[in-house]
Structures are given as structure tokens and as C-alpha cells.
Amino acid sequence: MKKLLILGAGTAGTMVANKLSHLLDLEEWKITLVDQDATHYYQPGFLFIPFGMYSRSDVVKPKRDFVPHGAELILSSIAEIDAEGNRVHLADGRVLSYDFLIIATGADIHPEQTPGLAEHEWGRSIHTFYSFEGALALFKHLQTWRGGRLVVNVVENPIKCPVAPLEFLMLADWFFHEKGIRDRVELIYATPLPGAFTKPIASKLLSGLLEEKNIRVEPEFMLEHVDPDAKKLVSYDEREVEYDLLVSVPLNMGAEVIGKSGLGDELNFIPVDKHTFLSPKYSNLFVLGDAAAVPTSKAGSVAHFAVDLFGENFVRHTEGLEMQPLFDGHANCFIESGFGKGLLIDFNYDTEPLPGRYPLPGVGPFTLLQESEANHWGKLMFRWMYWNLLLKGQELPLPARMSMAGKRMPATA
Amino acid sequence: MATRTIAGKTVEVNEEGFLINPNDWTKEIAVELAKEEGIPELTEAHWKVIEFCRKDAGATGKAPTLRRITTAAGVSTKDMFALFPKGPAKKVARISGLGKPEGCV
Ligand SMILES: Cc1cc2nc3c(=O)[nH]c(=O)nc-3n(C[C@H](O)[C@H](O)[C@H](O)COP(=O)(O)OP(=O)(O)OC[C@H]3O[C@@H](n4cnc5c(N)ncnc54)[C@H](O)[C@@H]3O)c2cc1C
């Protein structure tokens, strides 16, 4: 029996286990998944929890429900990866050997890395929606919050789903409007980026939208520390931003075990080939999802396209054939913009998000880089697709590689 | 893609003014690009960072992120902001003749 070991049974690990269980002969292959947490979280849903649009039960399901037939899920924390010895040490003392290893341990928030952030005001005037507990606590807080200055801050990039902070602000604009207190709330976005988004055309269009909604951007703001008593953010170049309520997107890092095993970069993300996900160092080691240091967004949609293209490529590799440079960095993200509307961006390593229609040129139903109700419904439908199709490794009627059909270059970029 | 002449040398640059080919880079070009970035004079501390970035990019094939520079070159983030105000990683990458760092996607 050949042993395929998958570390992390989150979005990417679950999808790839399902995909490969169809492509590999399970008489010859044993697939094992390891995860420390029995619960699967639908993380995109964390965005909606603070505003009461989703509750606990919308975003959690048991991981077991998504483990393919014939594969085993071991519940334990991973203590060390010995890539030289083709072995993985679990925290419960077990040692697992493998022929092929797929690392999909994701990324998580580290508020303790920023002085003042996760101290006595954490959970009081400082919140986050980047974790399940955080989103629930923020929901409670917003129920009784009477208004003031709400600052959303991204500590450092890269972060999971780089549009989520913008979505939070636009939903907050709508939420406070509905509550009748929008005139008593100031909304500010303090970001290390020079503008609203990472890529120029989308950044320009999104900035316009934020302006319309009276959301102020404080660009190039690199947070040095938080002063939790004076309630202000202080940047490295000594700018100060005061807040009444801070909604933080803390530093995102790969799993600690990656650093400990000597596999990661400064943020514990693992360098791999950006088209095949193969490690340049170990020919039987792959990294999928947020754990990989590749220059595309850390998003579930990216992981989906990646896994779609990875499956057959992996089989080629196990048969001794050369892998094909298939993955193009394709990302496809709905952006909630409040008041029952949303935007959609579709891009890859080489092409920035452009306006147009998706997936059918001229028809849509989704509009690229432009607000529409269809996009809002798309975003809400995504949850159903995630639980029922994506995790189970089923094909979507969408091409995995980005297509230029339906996109256009704006006249003045 | 456009070409322009910097410090007497004609080089290819992208829309954001980054050199396309890191091998076109010279110290004289760095001095000129630094001026455009609002840094009138490159001190020894600047050169230390520039040299680190050139070397690191030579090994990894891409411009280092701010976190990479601070952990691997031993310069504090605070000092980086003092040396290359506002976006330090992006500024030093441009002055060093490298592409834009990939930290933000
Ligand atoms: C607020 C928010 C909003 C988002 N919105 C969107 C969106 O709209 N669209 C979109 O496409 N994406 C979105 N994302 C991103 C998306 O959720 C992630 O990109 C995706 O879940 C990544 O999958 P992954 O498998 O790499 O990591 P994960 O799904 O996080 O899985 C990692 C797994 O590894 C396990 N693990 C880690 N370390 C260990 C260890 N030492 N031992 C054992 N197990 C371990 C964890 O328990 C976890 O189950 C959002 C994320 C957040 C936080």
C-alpha cells in the first residue's frame, strides 16, 4: 500500500482528500488526514456573524461528515514534520510515515504579535471577526454599541481573503444605517496598502465605492502598537488613529509546526512551485491552500481551483511523469457591499481584476467590479455550494483557470 | 513596457517605474531612483539594506517583503520606516532595481 498523508482537514485538505479518493485506486492507496479540531468552520461566514446575518449553526459542521469513504481522519495536533525521514510526529506520540505528503494546515491570526492588541481590552473595545469566537463576541458587542469611531485595521499582509475587511466596513455602513445610528458612527479603514485593494484598477473602483459610503481610508498605515488605554493605533512612522471600537485583522501566520519543522518562511508559510504546489526541496511534498507561500489570495475559491488542477497532476507525478504548470493563480471573490448588493472580482497571477460579466460574457449573471443584487445572492449561495459541492470535491460548472472572456480593460485605468 | 534613461543608462521599466531587468541596475541608478522616492542621499545604513535586498533577490528570485528584511537583515521595522519612509519594502525594492514585493495579493 502507498501512503498519502494529508495534514490539516480544513478547506484544502478536505477537498483534496475527496478529489484524490476518486482519482486514486484505494486498493493501492491509503489516504490519511490529520487535524487537531473535530469541527469544520465555514470561515467566509465569520463576516456575517457580527451583523446577525449568520449564526453559529450556519458555519460549523463535523469534519467527519466530509471525510471520503476509505480515508481515515486522525484527530490530533501535529507536533513535527520530519521531511527528511518521511515521517510526521503527532502530539499524542504516534508517528506516521508516508510516501507522499500534502500540507494544508492553513493560516491563523496572531494578535499576541502586536503590542497592546490582545491585552486587557481584547474582547472589550478591541475585537476581530477573523476567528469563530471573535465573530460571536463582536456580534454581542454590536448589539449594544451606541456609536462612535469604528476603525478596521489590517496589521500586515498577506491576510486570508484580502477583501473581507472592506466587506466588513460596507456591511457596517448598512448595519448602522438600518439601526438608525449611521450618523453617529465614523467608519475608518487603516491599511498598510497604498489604497483600498492590492491591484490598481480594483483599488480605484473600490476607493470610489468607499467614498460614496463615507468610509475613510488611512493608507500606508503599518501598525507598531496599540495603546489600549488611550484607545489609539500608533504606526511605525508615528501616525496615530484613535478609535472607540477597533476591529482588528491581526497578523496572519502559517501553523507553528511549520516553523518548528524548519519548512517555512518568516511567517511560517511554505515556499512551493506556484503552478504545481510541489516543494523545491522534497519531491514527495506538496502544499495546498493558505499554508503555501504563493503570490495569490489566501481564499477558499483559490484552494478550490488549485485542487481541481492539482488532482490529475498529482497522479501524473506518482506515475513518474513531469507535472504540468497548470495553476494560474486564479481567484474569484464575491465582495459584499451592503444593502443587498455585492461585487465580484476574478483574477490570476498575471491579470488584475477587471470589469465585465461572469461567467458568461455579456450575460453574467454576475457583474465584475460593479455592484449588483446577483452578486449578493452569489455570495450567499456560496455557503450552500461550499458545504454540498466544494468540500466533497465535486466539479463546479466553472473553469478552474481564469478566462478573459467577458472582461474588458477600462478606458482610463 | 517603456524605456527610460536613468543616470546615463537606458533601461526598461514597468508601469510603476520598477526596473524590468535587475541586471540593468547600477549604484548610480540607485542614487537617482532614491531621489525620486524622496531620499536625497543614500547613507551607509541605506546601502546595507539595498545590498541585502539585491543578494536576497538573487537567491530567491523575488524582492524581499518588509518582514523578510527585518528578520533576515537585522534592521528593525522602525529603522526601515526612518530610512525609507512610507512603504519601505516597496521603496527599497524599486531603488534596488527589483520587482515589487509580493507580500500583498
Ligand atoms: C473572515 C474570513 C472571511 C473569508 N471569506 C472568504 C470568502 O468570501 N471567499 C473565500 O474564498 N475565502 C474566504 N476566506 C478564506 C478561506 O476561509 C480560507 O482561505 C480557506 O479556509 C483556506 O483553507 P485551508 O485548507 O488552507 O486552511 P483551513 O481551512 O484554515 O484549514 C487548516 C486546518 O489545519 C488544521 N491545523 C493547523 N495546524 C494544525 C496542527 N498543528 N495540528 C493539527 N491540525 C492543524 C486546522 O485545525 C484546520 O482545520 C475567509 C476567511 C476568513 C477568516
Image: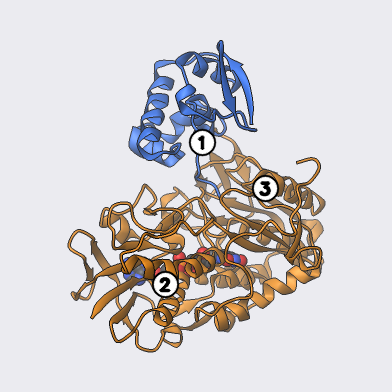
Chain colours: A orange, B blue
Q: Residues within 10 Å of mark 2 (few under 14, many from 20)?
A: many
SS at mark 2 in the image: helix
Q: Mark 2 highlights which residue?
A: A13
Instruction: Name which quarter of the figure residue A30 lies in.
Output: bottom left
Mark 1 or mark 3, whichever is nearer to me: 3
Q: Name the amino acid type tagged 3.
A: Ala
Chain letter of disc 1 in the image:
A
Instruction: Name which quarter of the figure residue A330 lies in.
Output: bottom right
Count of marks overlaid on the render: 3
Q: Are marks 3 and 2 on the same chain?
A: yes
Q: Counting residues from the N terminus, which is met first, the one under dot 2 or under dot 1?
A: 2
Give yes or no for contact between labels 3 and 2 (Cβ–Cβ under 8 Å).
Answer: no
Chain letter of disc 3 in the image:
A
At x 25%, y 63%, the residue is: A81
Q: Is residue A244 left or right of residue A276?
A: right
Kindly report the distance in space between the C-alpha atoms of the residues bearing marks 3 and 2. 31 Å
Q: Is residue A277 left or right of residue A258?
A: right
SS at mark 3 in the image: loop
Kindly report the distance in space between the C-alpha atoms of the residues bearing marks 2 and 1. 37 Å
Q: Is residue A110 left or right of residue A136?
A: left
At x 31%, y 62%, the residue is: A285
From the viewer's perspective, is residue A300 above or below residue A59? above
Residue A129 on image: x %, y %: 56, 65
Q: Are marks 1 and 3 on the same chain?
A: yes
Mark 3 or mark 2, whichever is nearer to me: 2
Q: Residues within 10 Å of mark 1 (few under 14, many from 20)?
A: some
Instruction: Name which quarter of the figure residue A384 lies in.
Output: bottom right
Quarter holding the N terminus of chain A? bottom left
Give the camera-side residue of A3 and A382.
Answer: A3
Q: Name the amino acid type tagged 1.
A: Tyr
Q: Mark 3 highlights which residue?
A: A196
